[in-house]
Amino acid sequence: MIPRYSRPEMVALWAPEAKFQIWFEIEAHACDAQAELGVIPKEAAAAVWDRGRFEVERIDAIEAEVKHDVIAFLTNLAEHVGPEARFVHQGMTSSDVLDTCFNLQLVRAADLLLADIDRLLAALETRAREHKLTPCIGRSHAIHAEPTTFGLKLAQAHAEFQRNRTRLEAARAEVATCALSGAVGTFAGIDPRVEAHVAEALGLEAETISTQVIPRDRHAMYFATLAVVASSIERLAVEIRHLQRTEVLEAEEFFSEGQKGSSAMPHKRNPVLTENLTGLARMVRAYALPAMENVALWHERDISHSSVERMIGPDATVTLDFALGRLAGVIERLMVYPENMAANLDRLGGLIHSQAVLLALTQAGMSREAAYALVQKNAMPIWREGGSFKDALKADAEVSAHLDAAALDACFDLAPHLARVDLIFARVFGPSAD
């Protein structure tokens, strides 16, 4: 987590102050529940809320001596609460605090990421509608295939991020659990009603069964979901990078006044934002594997997962938050060049309509094999030497024997490629899409 690829709101979620505030709330809510159950005096619970304070620097200093972060926190808390602090942490173990806090941080991070996706979805829908019927060439294997529209490209990305939003909502629900079950998770020293109270107070669900730690399959699913979102970011970023290539130049990242593209070549306008997104996506994906390896802990608990999560929790969420924000900005300000799209559509002299000719010939009575060979025979010279594919076909007696000039002209019409755009948009954006 470095400032260059961080945004303040997500960073603040992982700051020591935010973490210790959650720890305090867990302990204070637990005291409330213990007081209601008659385990501790109600005055003690009130004292925790009234006088409870902490200082990050003091906690760090205590931890340097005791080598235990939760004990350091409780010691600093007790310095403020006074004698009633002896009732804090009754029947609890460190993981009750650490795991519940970590899950709450992941839930709050998911909320920020969902808002990021919403911004991106709005940008994609706006630009998709703007270019709904802007024709461009579709590519398979990076080679010109058949016409599509730029709006459809963006609609596809919108549908993908709709799925990502659903996945992230599920991941949020998966990790939104609380555990206050004590040593090895048996509730020997704490009433399960304390756990239920704290869970409700924090907007979480009580963990079904914990073994002193919350099971890490939940976290594996969460970080795997972040990795999938990152992969979708890269998919769209790579598309934009290709479209910005000099030989293509159908779309381009916004280039601001005073921006420089190269220290050596003043003419350069490079796709630096989307290249950066490709790199950031690699990092987010890299955090998924250690999360999966954390699932296999020893017996009821070990701490092999702890160091991993202290790194991947902040790093994965902060990086993905930054990447989603950057991608939304790229889409919002993307420069689109319909005239270059039109030029690229014509670059192969009409070869992109070869399937329409093939189908017309089969409809006119030729076998598919014979029609394919005939169309390919006329296409390859155009591919190698240039020229007009339609003119070559009209000059071929065998083609003319099956298709007259009007039938051939119809094969080169863009209309069929645009005819179902409304239907596809309705699938993506709903039946009211226009």
Image: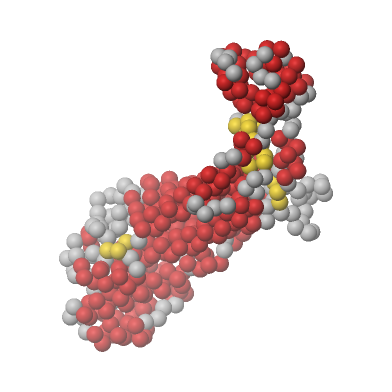
Q: Residue at x 52, y 59 (%)?
A: 118
Q: Position of residue 257 (x, y in %)?
A: 78, 59
Seen from the viewer's position, the closer of residues 395 and 182 is: 395
How many labels were placed on the picture? 0
Do we see residue 331 in this rendering?
no
Q: Residue at x 61, y 50 (%)?
A: 128
Against 264, is 67 above or below? below
Q: Quadrant of the N terminus?
A: bottom right
Against 405, is 160 above or below? below
Seen from the viewer's position, the closer of residues 148 and 64 is: 148
Against 221, is 148 above or below? above
- Quadrant location of residue 171? bottom left
Q: Position of residue 337 (x, y in %)?
A: 73, 46
Seen from the viewer's position, the closer of residues 401 and 412 is: 401
Q: Position of residue 244 (x, y in %)?
A: 70, 44
Q: Residue at x 28, y 82 (%)?
A: 45
Q: Residue at x 52, y 57 (%)?
A: 117
Seen from the viewer's position, the closer of residues 348 and 172 is: 348
